[in-house]
Amino acid sequence: MILRSAARLRQCCGLDGMSYPSASLNPMAMNAQKSPYSASMGPRPSISPDHKTLDRDTVAQLPKVELHDHIDGGLRPSTLLDLAQKSGYSGLPDAIMSQPEDARADALEEWFRTSAESGDLPSYLQLFAHTTAVMQTADAIERVTREAVEDLARDGVVYAELRFAPEQHQEQGLDLQHIVDAAIAGVRTGEQSAAAEDNPIVARLILCAMRNNNRSTEIARLVVDNAGDGSGYVVGFDLAGPEEGFSVREHAEALELLRENLVPFTIHAGEADGVGSMKDALALGASRIGHGARIYEDFGASLDGIELGPVAARVRDRTVALELCPTSNRQTGLVDSMEDHPLSLLYELGFTCTVNTDNRTVSGTTMTDEMLLLGECFDFGYDELLHLTLNAMDAAFLPLPDRQRLARDLIIPAYEELVGDPDMRGTSRTDGSSHHDDGADEHDPEGHSHDHAHGAHGHNHLGADTLNIDLGDLGLDDIDGLAGLDGLDLGDLGSDKRE
Ligand SMILES: [Zn+2]
């Protein structure tokens, strides 16, 4: 049985007609704790949950944090064309190259956008053959990296972790360190030119090893050599590439080297493969999960609400950040439509969610676009955007004082300015104290969240007054894990279970 709606679940469980005075008594909400707010990022302003309409210009200007952005997925189309011409790369589709020269960049942008709708990760990854082909010289790598930093800064991103796989840039004989140096030079000049444009940004690099290659230990060594004391431009490691059929465990040696040297790493998992892939990533020491959207496959349902399996519980309870990339996740076939994306559900269940682009050009998106999508599809407002931004800031591979400084000096003030508009001000607090200063409310293991801003305003999908919501809103339409209810003999679940 696929649960099509909460009403259906209620009916099945004989709960029809019952009402729940608070979220804590709502059987669907027993496990709902909402994404925890990290106090280490400092006090945050209270933003009215009533104010739901996201304005593009406002969102574009708000400070954003991007943790998952592939340099080779974000080339400016004009730069790709220019580099292709200079390098003699002739592999771009005829449909692009047959266009008049001044129309090619737009055509290429559109071609990526439509080609990305492949529905599976291996097809999606084929698009990168065109981008990495033109990034085989130090100058090209430096230019693309610098432009990525500039473009992110123009989109209001104040902190970005850009990633790429050095092993894919050796076709013309560059050695790995030379490649890393070129990317570092690009980050440095990108930060400088963005600052000159009055768009301050801090950018760092994550070096990826490809899961389908056998060079991860070599790349891990490269990261260790460049990461140093954590204050340099290289801050972490990642495993990227096709997930299914290429186990994390094949790269155990690389991950051990990183652990021994206290270098943090994230791993693409739970994107094109399921819970087992995420379990391996966690067991081998990943600090964050790249995507991790399929963590919902470790959910079950009972009369106590949604129940987390051991991997999901580990991710939520140890606040392992999920680098969710909604548009990319839809394009690679995780969901058919954005409304089905599990981000909203994961957020409401207390997972540490972050929102990211994955590949700005290939996926045809920006951080602003991703945030606006959350507003359109999940009714997220500025309060949730701030929450996601601080989650990302806190999960960054930066020293804590640097994360706190960015939150305190750039992120919080911008949202406080937003709250300067009386319509935006939260109504739950009038004394100017932090909306989240009562941490017990956020972390109450019993879920006794009585006047939680979202629940109190009917926004919380799992709140007391929203039992009539369709589970499709939560992306639950096709969650196999919930089909576990199918096997329940509901007649055996006596009324005492519901009291
Ligand atoms: Zn990725």
Image (cartoon, helix red, strand yellow):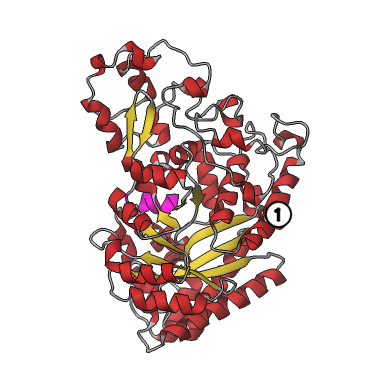
Q: Who is closer to the viewer here, 164 or 432?
A: 432
Residue for point 68% across, 37% down: 435
Looking at the rendered image, the quarter that the N terminus falls into is: top left
Q: Is residue 326 visible?
A: yes
Residues in magenta, as a range: 324-333
Report whether 267 appears left or right of 157.
Answer: left
Quarter residue 313 falls in: top left
Measured from the top left, where is residue 316 in percent x and y?
44, 44
| Residue identified by numbered label 1 | 408
Q: Who is closer to the viewer here, 90 or 160?
A: 160
Q: Is residue 274 visible?
A: no
* Amino acid of disc 1: Arg
The residue carrying mark 1 has its beta carbon less than 8 Å from ligand 1: no
Residue for point 35% across, 56% down: 283
Report whether 277 appears left or right of 422.
Answer: left
Quarter residue 381 falls in: top right
Q: Who is closer to the viewer here, 305 or 333?
A: 305
Measured from the top left, where is residue 467 in percent x and y?
45, 21
Residue for point 53% across, 36% down: 379
Residue for point 52% across, 37% down: 34
Report whether 483 appears left or right of 266.
Answer: left
Asked if 458 appears above or below 372 in the picture, the reply is: above
Give the farthest residue toward the bottom. Answer: 173
Asked if 450 appears above or below 400 in the picture, the reply is: above
Q: How many marks?
A: 1
